[in-house]
Amino acid sequence: MLPRAGQNEKQDAEIEKLSWRVSLRFYGFEMSETEIEHLAATTIAVAHVRWQWISSWVVAERLKMSAASSAAA
């Protein structure tokens, strides 16, 4: 991830093809290593919380379904 986000100091054509600057077209777009680390940590934290929420919702729905089928029987 880091080589794609930073400066292309060697002016390597292959690195430039993979660069986000080419695909995103942001003027002056660049992320430092620290910014990338913070973004990655935030993404992992959000994904973890989202996964916990989804898991809790699935458990609650299963309990509702089992309670409904027990009441019907």
Image (cartoon, grey):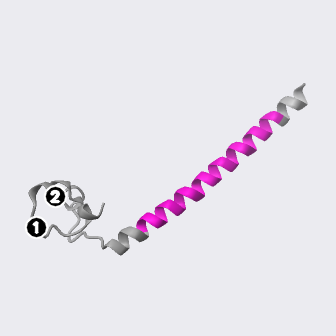
Q: Residues within 10 Å of mark 2 (few under 14, many from 20)?
A: some
* Sequence-wise first label, 2 or 1: 1
Quarter assignment of residue 14? bottom left
In the image: residue 49, left or right of residue 58: left
Mark 2–mark 1 distance (CA, rounded to whole Å): 9 Å
For the residue pair 69 and 17, the one nearer the viewer reads as 17
Tell me the residue that label 2 is attached to.
Answer: 15
Q: Amino acid at mark 2?
A: Ile
Residues rendered magenta in the picture: 39-66
Quarter assignment of residue 8? bottom left
For image coordinates 53% across by 61% down, the residue present is 46
For the residue pair 32 and 65, the one nearer the viewer reads as 32
Q: Position of residue 3 (x, y in %)?
A: 24, 63
In the image: residue 8, left or right of residue 37: left
For image coordinates 90% across by 25% down, the residue present is 73
Q: Magenta segment: does it hold 67?
A: no
Q: Quadrant of the N terminus?
A: bottom left
Q: Position of residue 52 (x, y in %)?
A: 63, 54
Tell me the residue that label 1 is attached to.
Answer: 10
For image coordinates 22% across by 55% down, the residue present is 23
Q: Amino acid at mark 1?
A: Lys
Q: Residues within 10 Å of mark 1 (few under 14, many from 20)?
A: few
Quarter assignment of residue 12? bottom left
